[in-house]
Amino acid sequence: MKRKIPSNNKDLVIALNELVILKRKTRGLIAELKSANKNLAIAKKDKGKRQAELGIANLELAHQVKEKGKRASELELVLKEKGKRASELILANKELEFQSREKGKRANELSAINKKIQFQNKEKAKQAAELELANKELKFQNKEKANRASELKIANKELGFQNKEKGKRAAELELANKELKFQNKEKAKRAAELIIANKELAFQNSEK
């Protein structure tokens, strides 16, 4: 015939089982806390990388603005040269009129001047083509600048979102720490109760 387990022993077994379950839950929470700390460290590292990328982007944007200023100065010089070229052409035409009146004596000189004028016209056409290319390049740089500004705006929004997520994660970690402290207190209380139960059981056994 099997010996019946006293009710106090059953309570002790139940209490021990609950203690085992509580230990497992505590280990699970500790593992979750460690995982959360790792995720927080990764988020901080990603934030540092993002700030470095933004710094590089700002440097690149400053470089583009500087290049744009240089290009504008070059265009201004080209326009000045064009004005000078026009003045030279006016003088050349006046000189050509004078030489036409003196064509008997100045035939060779007129031939040289005509060649010079042809060369100048070619140079003028080249300058016009260069100015057109420079204008296209300047428009392209302005578009790139606008695109870069949009990218920086998006990057700043993303950084703000990451900071918010970081704050949420910190709050969750704080709640998890509070819950873990509470569970540790409950564990200590349960252990004290188990000690009292063991003493009572030992006392009952001695009475038998």
Image (cartoon, rainbow, N blue to C red):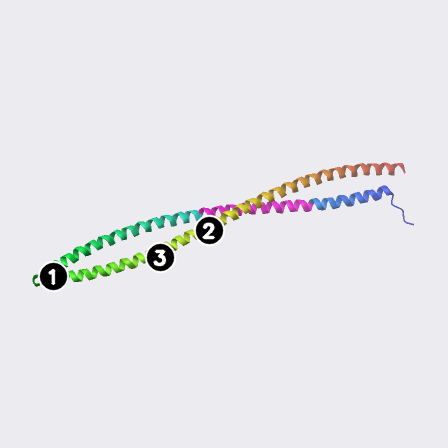
User: How many residues crowd around disc 1 within 10 Å: few (fewer than 14), some, or many (20 or more)?
Assistant: some
Mark in front: 2 vs 1: 1
Q: Which residues are magenta?
A: 27-55
Assign a secondary structure to mark 1: helix
Mark drawn on residue 100 = 1
Rounded to the nearest whole Å, what is the CA distance between mark 1 and mark 3?
A: 42 Å
What is the x, y in percent for residue 89?
19, 56
Q: Give left or right: position of 3 versus 64.
A: right
Name the foreground residue: 74 vs 175: 74
Name the foreground residue: 108 vs 184: 108
For the residue marked with disc 1, what is the amino acid?
Ser
User: How many residues crowd around disc 3 within 10 Å: few (fewer than 14), some, or many (20 or more)?
Assistant: few
For the residue marked with disc 2, what is the amino acid?
Ser
Q: Which residue is mark 3?
A: 136
Q: Quadrant of residue 169?
A: top right
Rounded to the nearest whole Å, what is the CA distance between mark 2 and mark 1?
A: 63 Å
Number of dots carrying numbers: 3
Dot 2 or dot 1: first in sequence order is: 1
Up the image or down, 17 lies above or below 85; here it is above
Rounded to the nearest whole Å, what is the CA distance between mark 2 and mark 3?
A: 21 Å
Q: Residue at x 17, y 62 (%)?
A: 115
Dot 1 or dot 3: first in sequence order is: 1
For the residue marked with disc 3, what is the amino acid?
Lys
Q: Give left or right: position of 121 versus 193.
A: left
Assign a secondary structure to mark 2: helix
Q: Which residue is mark 2?
A: 150
Q: Residue at x 21, y 59 (%)?
A: 120
